[in-house]
């Protein structure tokens, strides 16, 4: 069980924090050498208690080595140049709301546009209810909405189906989980525990950054 946990933890940190492939290889080689040393000690000892301890240590080191090997595989698979072909039928009709919410919560408005695009295709989802139970324009789980939902339009209620509330609440949530500090990967991981989701949203954000430069400059 702890081996699976170890793989998950190392995978999360490789995704969220910048770790070079060279650093990962160094760690992998370190544990490889330790395993070789343990194997030599096992061949040399006749002490049963010592052999049991070496076997336990070998299992632990092997788990670390496998975790770093998996991290290297992930790094290789997910090193890419962001590429996104937008649905040209949409022209960011909510761009003013993205900008207002982003300014209030100190994040980049293009992140809100990318998340909105990813979650409901700019509110064009048929029901705006996911199979997992996420609700509204920006797809909040009910428990998350209870904590981060805001009444942005001042009508006295917080409603994930009201576009102003949804966008400002998404800005609130993304800011609180790292985006306000520039930790975009961490914020997207909190929004949806999927590395694929994070990569897709970042590709879309890159598109909006590159193609709406004038709007971004005006709002700085």
Image: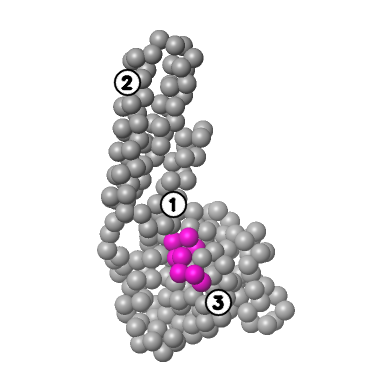
Question: Residue at left 57%, top 59%?
Answer: 134
From the viewer's perspective, is residue 170 above or below residue 41?
below
Query: Picture coordinates of residue 57 (x, y %)?
Result: 44, 27
Picture quadrant of residue 149: bottom right
Q: Residue furthest right?
A: 156
- How many labels, in total? 3
What is the spatial separation of the Cα atoms under label 1 and label 2, in whole angstroms?
32 Å
CB contact under 8 Å: marks 3 and 2: no
Q: Nearer the viewer, mark 3 or mark 2?
A: 2
Which disc is residue 105 wearing?
A: 3
Query: Picture coordinates of residue 75 (x, y %)?
Result: 32, 51
Query: Picture coordinates of residue 5 (x, y %)?
Result: 50, 40
Question: Residue at left 44%, top 52%?
Answer: 13
Mark 3 lies on a secondary structure that is helix
Query: Picture coordinates of residue 177 (x, y %)?
Result: 54, 64
Mark 1 or mark 2, earlier in chain: 1
Residue to which mark 1 is pinned:
13
Mark 2 lies on a secondary structure that is helix
Question: Residue at left 61%, top 70%?
Answer: 160
Mark 1 or mark 3, earlier in chain: 1
Mark 1 lies on a secondary structure that is helix
Can the viewer see residue 31 in this picture?
A: yes
Q: Which residues are magenta?
A: 180-187
Residue to which mark 2 is pinned:
40
């Amino acid at each position: 069980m702890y081996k699976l946990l170890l793989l998950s933890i190392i995978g999360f940190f490789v995704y969220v924090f910048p770790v070079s492939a060279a650093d990962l290889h160094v760690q992998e080689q370190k544990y490889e050498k330790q395993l070789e040393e343990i194997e030599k000690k096992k061949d040399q000892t006749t002490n049963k208690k010592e052999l049991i301890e070496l076997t336990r240590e070998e299992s632990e080191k092997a788990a670390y080595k496998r975790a770093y090997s998996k991290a290297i595989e992930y790094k290789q698979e997910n090193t890419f140049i962001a590429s996104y072909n937008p649905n040209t039928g949409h022209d960011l009709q909510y761009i003013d709301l993205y900008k207002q919410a982003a300014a209030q919560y100190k994040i980049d408005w293009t992140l809100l546009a990318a998340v909105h695009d990813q979650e409901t295709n700019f509110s064009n989802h048929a029901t705006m209810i996911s199979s997992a139970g996420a609700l509204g324009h920006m797809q909040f789980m009910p428990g998350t909405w209870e904590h981060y939902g805001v009444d942005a339009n001042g009508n006295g209620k917080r409603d994930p189906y009201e576009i102003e509330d949804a966008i400002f609440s998404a800005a609130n949530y993304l800011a609180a989980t790292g985006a306000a500090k520039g930790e975009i990967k961490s914020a997207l991981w909190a929004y949806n525990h999927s590395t694929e989701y994070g990569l897709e949203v970042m590709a879309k954000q890159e598109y909006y950054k590159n193609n709406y430069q004038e709007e971004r400059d005006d709002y700085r």
